[in-house]
Amino acid sequence: MPTDHSHIVKSFDEELARLSDLISRMGGLAETQLEQSIEALQKRDSSLAESAIEHDRKIDVLHAEVDEMAIRLLALRQPMAGDLRHIVTGLKIAPIVERIGDYAKNVAKRAVALNQMPPVKPLFTIPRMGRIVREMTKDVLDAFANNDVEKAHEVWLRDAEIDDMYDSLFRELLTYMMEDPRNITPCTHLLFVARNIERIGDLATNIAELIHYQVEGVILDADRPKTDRASVTVVEPE
């Protein structure tokens, strides 16, 4: 016959699962937001970009729910060891996911601006970067839900690929600007788009590092594979 203790443990496990689900829902919205932003850029669809911008409010609401639930669990359950790390990690991951949504929103805003200008030469790197960082975001949040350190580490390693793509695109866009001054404004917008996507990749690796701490109880003892050399050149304004 179940004891009161077993009921308490089951209830606590369900609450932890609920916390993970809220964060997963935040991540799903952020992924959709980025996907719509990139598609709006490719198809020059400002209405789709506006739809992506609207997702930001939903992410903010879920973020508030995560904070409220995590604080309640800390106060009422007084968790220990792994459970405590899980809740604290969730508290740290939620604002990172919210920031991913902010960067995706910035991409959508740039898409709206670019749609008012003549298109520049076709660029294939930005959609590729967007696809990879969406995959990184999904994979790292799956890793959080499943306590999967190996999957989190795979995401952590992929950041170098995004940095290399950003460096290549940075040089390509500078070349377009030097070839024709009329390209300066649209290419500047595209540089900000690429920078926002690159930053989402950085944030995914931040989450991967938190997952390593959550599961292993120690900080990931290695330098992140950072290769982009253009990162200090373009900074997205708040």
Image (tube, rainbow, N blue to C red):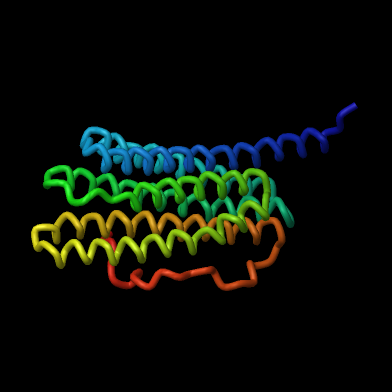
Q: Residue at x 31, y 46 (%)?
A: 105
Q: In the rendered view of the protein, which quadrant contains the N terminus?
A: top right
Q: Nearer the viewer, residue 168 or 92?
A: 168
Q: Nearer the viewer, residue 13 or 183?
A: 183
Q: Residue 99 at what x, y percent from top left?
A: 40, 53
Q: Nearer the viewer, residue 195 or 79?
A: 195
Q: How many marks?
A: 0
Q: Residue at x 16, y 63 (%)?
A: 177
Q: Residue 148 at what x, y percent from top left?
A: 67, 50
Of all residues shown, which one is farthest toward the left? 182
In the displayed structure, does residue 49 sit left or right of residue 155?
Answer: left
Q: Residue 201 at what x, y percent from top left?
A: 45, 56
Q: Quadrant of residue 16?
A: top right
In the displayed structure, does residue 46 sit left or right of residue 67?
Answer: left
Q: Residue at x 46, y 40 (%)?
A: 62
77 vs 6: above or below: below
Q: In the rendered view of the protein, which quadrant contains the C terminus?
A: bottom left
204 vs 115: above or below: below
In the displayed structure, does residue 201 sit left or right of residue 170?
Answer: right
Q: Quadrant of residue 188?
A: bottom left
Q: Residue at x 43, y 42 (%)?
A: 31
Of all residues shown, which one is farthest toward the right? 1
Q: Residue 206 at what x, y percent from top left?
A: 52, 60
